[in-house]
Image (cartoon, rainbow, N blue to C red):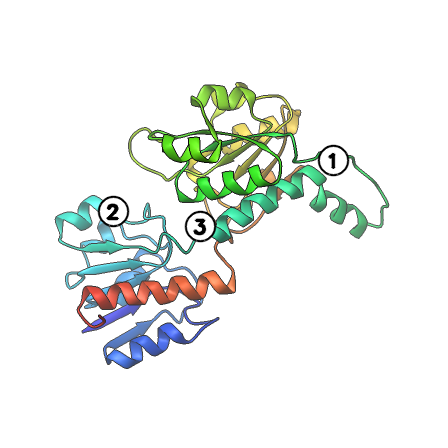
């Protein structure tokens, strides 16, 4: 049996997943190229593999049709929009993920971005580094209305954290957990009202083919003047050109983005002082990365009956 580990920095923080693979005695191929793999590289390195421990590299038709031995993709993380799930199902390829590990790090990242924008921490830092002693007034989180779009596990955690810090939290979801919302005191409302009323919009949706949320020109136009936008979910859910225009004009006061439509990102948002941009690092803590890798390996070993 052969398992291909596609992640570029696998085992960097904790050797446990490496030891797990070594213990069961399977042949393991590692990505030693030092970057995220493209389709041709996945096919070349992963040929004849029975299973893949995957990151966010693409597993589309080209890849799946050229990996005839593949039986399982074990995703290190939660999002699976980089996998052609319908084709994988048709080919009998199991697709697994590690959904619980990412909740806390992504929620903390979202809250950190909100505080950064409210108190203009990045702006003040950049100003000081330019030799300027300039002060810009900010806002309190307490009393601000936060709209959470997408109340899955991460959205729920963000809502709880912000509410505990004194924010008024509203939420919108295609299939809201009304019992949870009632228990937590979170107000569930329709998306148009969230856009219209939120001082801060925090996006926590997954990319699906139908009924996906998208923050485009019309949605931004409907938002409250001076609002903030936070996105730690998927870059495809925001029209970056429309967002840039709104930030440039002052329609929106700021944005915090960890994900982009094309990565690495080097577009015009980098020119603006009222944005906080990070290179897709929401889950990148030593603790969460170690746990995700361990769970991804355990998932694939259980699938093949190599771990009880």
Q: Earlier in the sequence, mark 1 or mark 2?
A: 2
Q: Quadrant of the C terminus?
A: bottom left
| Image coords of residue 70 (percent x, y) | 18, 61
Say left or right for 120 vs 4. Answer: right
Q: Dot 3: few (<14), some (14–19), or many (≥20) neighbours within 10 Å? A: many
Q: Given this view, does label 3 or label 1 mark the residue nearer the observer? A: 3
Residue 223 place in picture, x, y as percent: 55, 22
For the residue labelled by badge 1, is the local secondary structure a helix, a strand or a loop?
A: loop
Q: Are marks 3 and 2 in contact (CB under 8 Å)?
A: no
User: Along the horizontal axis of the image, is 58 left or right of 217?
Assistant: left
Cα separation, mark 3 vs mark 1, equals 28 Å
Disc 1/disc 2 C-alpha distance (Å): 44 Å
Q: Which residue is mark 2?
A: 84
From the viewer's perspective, is the residue at label 3 or at label 2 nearer?
A: 3
Q: Is residue 4 left or right of residue 77?
A: left
Q: Residue at x 43, y 34 (%)?
A: 183
How crowded pointer 1 is (Cα within 10 Å; few <14, some 14-19, many 20+) is rated as few
Where residue 111 sits in the image (x, y, percent)? 58, 44
Q: Earlier in the sequence, mark 3 or mark 1?
A: 3
Nearer to us in this view, 57 or 133: 133
Q: Which residue is mark 3?
A: 103
Q: CA distance from mark 3 to mark 2?
A: 24 Å
The residue that disc 1 covers is: 138
Q: Position of residue 239 (x, y in %)?
A: 48, 31
């Amino acid at each position: 049996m052969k398992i291909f580990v596609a992640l570029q920095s696998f085992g960097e923080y904790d050797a446990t997943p490496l030891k797990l693979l070594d213990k069961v005695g399977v042949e393991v191929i590692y990505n030693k190229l030092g970057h995220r793999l493209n389709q041709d590289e996945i096919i070349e390195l992963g040929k004849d593999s029975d299973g893949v421990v995957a990151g966010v590299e693409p597993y589309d038709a080209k890849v799946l049709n050229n990996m005839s031995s593949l039986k399982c993709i074990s995703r290190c993380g939660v999002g699976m929009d980089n996998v052609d799930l319908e084709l994988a199902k048709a080919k009998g390829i199991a697709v697994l993920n590690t959904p619980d590990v990412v909740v806390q790090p992504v929620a903390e990242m979202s809250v950190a971005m909100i505080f950064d924008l409210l108190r203009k921490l990045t702006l003040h830092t950049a100003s000081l580094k330019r030799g300027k002693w300039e002060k810009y007034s900010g806002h309190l989180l307490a009393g601000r209305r936060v709209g959470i779009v997408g109340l899955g596990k991460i959205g729920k955690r963000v809502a709880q954290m912000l509410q505990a810090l004194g924010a008024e939290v509203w939420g919108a979801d295609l299939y809201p957990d009304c019992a949870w919302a009632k228990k937590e005191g979170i107000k569930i409302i329709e998306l148009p009202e969230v856009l219209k009323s939120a001082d801060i919009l925090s996006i926590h949706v997954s990319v699906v083919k139908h009924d996906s949320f998208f923050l485009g020109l019309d949605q931004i136009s409907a938002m409250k003047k001076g609002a903030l936008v936070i996105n730690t979910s998927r870059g495809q859910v925001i029209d970056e050109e429309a967002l840039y225009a709104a930030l440039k004009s002052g329609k929106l006061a700021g944005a915090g983005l960890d994900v982009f439509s094309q990565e690495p990102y080097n577009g015009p948002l980098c020119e603006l002082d009222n944005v906080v941009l990070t290179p897709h690092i929401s889950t990148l803590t030593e603790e969460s990365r170690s746990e995700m890798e361990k769970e991804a390996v355990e998932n694939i070993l259980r699938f093949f009956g190599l771990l009880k």
